[in-house]
Amino acid sequence: MKKTLLFASLFFVLAMKTNAQVGPDITSWIINPDSLANIDTGGNQGYESNVLLVQYSASKVYVTCNSIANYAVGPWPGNPNVPAPQYFDCEFPRNPSQDTAHAIWTYLGPIGLWSNGVAIYNQKDAHYWNNASSNFSMGEDTSGTGWNRNALVYEGVSFDNCLGHPDQSGCYHNHVNPKCLYNDADSTHHSPIIGYAFDGFPIYGAYGYASAMTPGTVKRMHSSYVLTTDTTRAGGPHPISTYPLGNMCEDYVYTPGAGDLDYYNGRYCVTPDYPSGTYAYFVTIDGNLNPVYPFVLGPKYYGYPASTHPKNPVIGPDTTYYGTTNVKAPAANIKYQVVPNPVDDYAYIYMDLSSVNNVKGSLYNTDGRLLKTIDYMQPSMAYTLDMSDLPAGMYMLSLQGGGKTVTEKIVKK
C-alpha cells in the first residue's frame, strides 16, 4: 500500500499507540516509497524516491531514504553523474539545543535532509580557490589553504531546474533553495518546513513572520552575510578581476543586524508548526527567487548534530510512523497554482496546503490525446511538468482527486 505523508501543519495531532509525543519532527517527512524517480538522463527510472521509513523514540527520529527526488530532475549540463540510491539511515535529535561551547562546522556531504529525503549540502564545492580538493570532512579548515569555492558560482551551471545535481557517488542534493519542493514564490504565507538539519532544528522555506515572536505579516527572510569590499585576500586568490568577489565563501562576512537571520542563518521564532517558538533555519533567496549566501545553514550548526555521517545504523526499539494511513484526511478541494503560464519548457504545479491529497494530473492536447501524467500529487508539494518536448500550442491540464476534477489551460510558447 502506498504510504504518503502530508506536511505537519495539516496533521499535527495523530492517534498513535506510543508514549512519545508526535510532533513536526516526525510528521513533516514525505513518506512515499512506492513513488519511482523521474530522472531526465541515464534511464534510472526504477529507484524508490521520497522518504522510505520514519522511526522514532522519545529522543530520536530515524529517517531512511535514497536521496532520490520524486519530481523530475536533470539534465545537469557538464555533469556526467547520474542519481543513484544512497540507502541513508539518518538520525535527528528530538530535543535539540544550542551548542554554546563550540559550535560545529558543517562538513562536506549531507548536513541534513529535505523533507523528501534528498540530501542537503553546505555552501562549499569541496575545492579551494586553487582547485585543490578540500581535505577535511568536518570542522574548520586547518590546512592553511583556505578560501573555499562557492558551490553556486562554481557548480551552479550544472544545477537542474530544481537547483540540484548528483555528485560522483550518485547522491542527488541541493546546496541551495530546493526550488521544486515548495512554492518559493508564495510571499503571502509562512513557508512550510522543508527539511531538518542533523542537529534536529527545522529548516523552513524563504518566508517567515515579520515579527519573530508574533504570528502575522509574512516577509522574505534576509541573510546577514554581506559581500566584503576588500580588494585583497590574504593568502588567497588574486587578482579580483580573475576571481571576482563572491566566488569564495569567505568573501561573505557575517554582519549582525544586516538581515533577519543570525550567523547560523536562522533565528528563534514562532512558526505555524511551533507556536511556542523554536530555533529554525531559513533558506535565503532574493526578490527574483535567486539563491542568496549562505543558502541554507551558515558555516556552523546551531546545535549538536546527532550524527556526522548519514549511514549510522538505526537503533531501536522505535515506533514506525506511517503517515496518513492512520488518519482520515479532511474533505478538501483541489487547490493549486501553475507557473509560469505561458511556459517555455517546464511548468511547475504547486499544490496548496489545504488541497486534497493523492491528486492525479493529466495533460492533454487539443485533440484530447493524453500526453503526460503525474500521480499522487500531495499538498505543500511542487511538481515539474516537462513540456520541453511538446510543440507550441494550447494544452489542457486535468487534476482529479477527492471525487473532484478541475482543468486549466496551459499555453506552450
Image (cartoon, grey):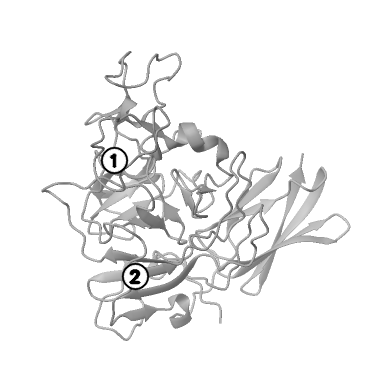
Q: Quadrant of the N terminus?
A: bottom right
Residue found at the far right of this picture: 367
Q: Looking at this view, is 228 or 331 the one in front?
A: 228
Residue at the image position 77 percent from the left and 55 percent from the top: 396
Q: Position of residue 349 (x, y in %)?
A: 61, 53
Q: Is residue 218 visible?
A: yes
Toward which corner of the image does residue 16 lie, by quadrant? bottom left
Q: Looking at this view, is 207 or 311 the one in front?
A: 311
Q: Position of residue 341 (x, y in %)?
A: 68, 43
Q: Is residue 143 above or below residue 358?
A: above
Residue at the image position 76 percent from the left and 43 percent from the top: 412
Q: Looking at this view, is 256 or 124 the one in front?
A: 124
Q: Can you identify the residue that label 2 sits on?
A: 62
Q: Can you identify the residue that label 1 sits on?
A: 299
Q: Is residue 191 left or right of residue 37?
A: left
Residue at the image position 40 percent from the left and 48 percent from the top: 121
Q: Looking at this view, is 334 or 139 the one in front?
A: 139
Residue type at mark 2: give it: Tyr
Q: Quadrant of the C terminus?
A: top right
As helix, strand or loop, the secondary structure at mark 1 comes to loop
Q: Residues within 10 Å of mark 2 (few under 14, many from 20)?
A: many
Q: Position of residue 135 (x, y in %)?
A: 33, 41
Q: Is residue 7 above or below residue 388?
A: below
Residue type at mark 1: give it: Pro
Q: Is residue 326 left or right of residue 43?
A: left
Query: What is the total number of numbered labels drawn onto the structure image?
Result: 2
Q: Is residue 104 left or right of residue 113?
A: left
